[in-house]
Amino acid sequence: MLFPSMIKKNMSREKNRLSAALIGQRLIESGHLTVEQLDEALQLQRETGLLFGEVCLLKGWISYDQLKGCLPSLRSKLGEKLLALGYITMEQLWLALLEQRNSGERLGEILVDRGWVDRTNLNSVVQKR
């Protein structure tokens, strides 16, 4: 018998696989990724639990801008705005997003707690959203 939490976890994994396949297809079609890299990234995604785009970025196969161009619109633009304003680095954003995925905390709170963003700057960006 499957418990609701197990069903939800399996559905989430399937959604991530489908999303990765679609992003991978877009990256191949745009000439940013090879089929071999796609296969390797999907394997690494299964082994590490990282998102497909994170694997490709960490391997150095694509740039953030290339990935961003192939992603569906992001749910939250906070990290992107903070990055564009120079308040955080790409590395800080990715580390905070990884932490957010594990902790469920709000992205802005993680960035402030780590000392990477001043609360005043964060509030200013949030109010403009």
Image (cartoon, helix red, strand yellow):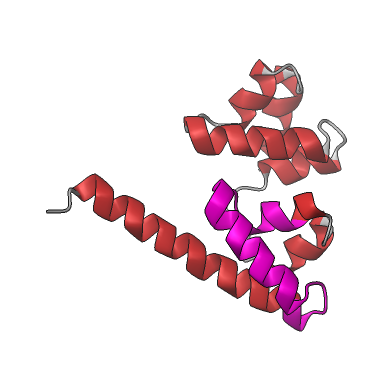
Q: Quadrant of residue 63?
A: bottom right
Q: Is residue 78 left or right of residue 15?
A: right
**Residue most toward the left?**
1
- Residue, x 68% and y 51% (percent of image)? 54
- Residue, x 41% and y 64% (percent of image)? 14
Work out whether 57 lies above or below 83. below
Is residue 33 located in the magenta-colored stretch of the structure?
yes
- Residue, x 49% and y 70% (percent of image)? 18
- Image location (x, y in percent) of residue 67: 75, 62
Q: Quadrant of residue 31?
A: bottom right
- Image location (x, y in percent) of residue 66: 81, 64
The range drawn in magenta is 28-56
- Image location (x, y in percent) of residue 9: 34, 51
Looking at the picture, tell me which residue is in the foreground, 46 or 87.
46
Q: How many marks?
A: 0
Looking at the picture, tell me which residue is in the foreground, 9 or 37.
37
